[in-house]
Amino acid sequence: MDTLAMHISNGIINGPVAGIFAALALAALTVCVLRGRRDLDDRLAPMAGLVAAFIFAVQMLNFPIFTAGVSGHLLGGALAALLVGPWVGALCVAVVLVVQALVFGDGGVAMLGLNVTNMALLGTAVAYLLIAGLLRVLPRTPTGLGVTAFVSALLSVVVAAQGFVLQYWLGGTTDLGGNITGLAATMGGVHLLIGIGEGLITATTVVTVAKVRPDLVYALRALKPATPAPVPAVGGVR
């Protein structure tokens, strides 16, 4: 293919595998809608729109990986998870992917389930799990929040890229001669570099929002800091 698509293009993965992941993505997004309705309020709803618009913009930064129609780019899953939570965050990324596929032709429509699985579901879920763990041990200062945002964005991008490797192993249309390990190394290495850029953008954005309106950062509201274990009384002194 002479033109690189932003996401997985039609023909990269075979139809049966694409159909399975489309069904999985639809089921997962249904759960996100049901769970996300509990979080939506007058504060989160407009924030979700802003997050989706920002993710749409940063995903336009596109980095070609190889000439098979696949490219790397910023994902936004960690940013969405930090600002609007995992359920609404996954929906924000999914909406961006649908608009890009249907309106701008970025990624094949038949491959939409694959792209949603990797970027909206897998990327956001991994990011939020890391966020939940890191915010329980790191101080809730700008530095601690910045480190949390950077690490979660970096690793979520790498894991999402490996999601594509799994999909290609299951139903890739081009024979790699059994060199799926080479594909995994290529995707992991390139997306590690992309993840560093995404981590910096995510950390800068989230820390800036937290300094101005910390109440708009979902992760700071929803995730409670770890409470230290009570120290037992010794010698009758409390």
Image (tube, grey):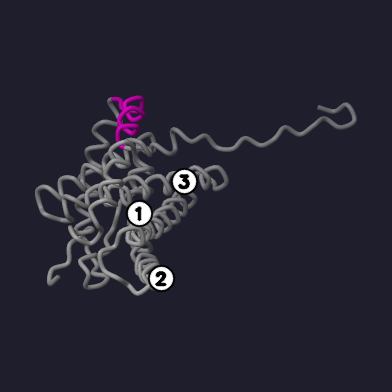
Of residues 125 and 163, which is closer to you in this image? Answer: 163
The amino acid sitting under disc 1 is: Thr
Residue positioned 22% across, 58% down in the render: 7
Q: Which type of secondary structure does the marked residue at label 3 adopt?
A: helix
Residue, disc 3: 131
Which one is earlier in the sequence, the residue at label 2 or at label 1?
2
Instruction: Pick whichever, 81 or 166, lies toward us.
Output: 166
Residue denoted by label 1: 204
Please give the range of residues in magenta.
Answer: 29-41
Q: Please tell me in which quadrant of the rendered image residue 13 appears.
A: bottom left
For the point 17% across and 62% down, the residue is 5
The residue type indicated by label 3 comes to: Ile
Which amino acid is tagged 2? Ala
Asked if the stretch drawn in magenta spans residue 234, the answer is no
Residue hosting label 2: 185
- Residue 165 screen position, x and y as percent: 36, 61
**Real-space Cα distance between discs 2 and 1?**
28 Å
**Residue drawn 26% across the image and 37% down it:** 48
Classed neighbour count for the residue bearing mark 2: other residues with Cα under 10 Å, few (<14), some (14–19), many (≥20): few
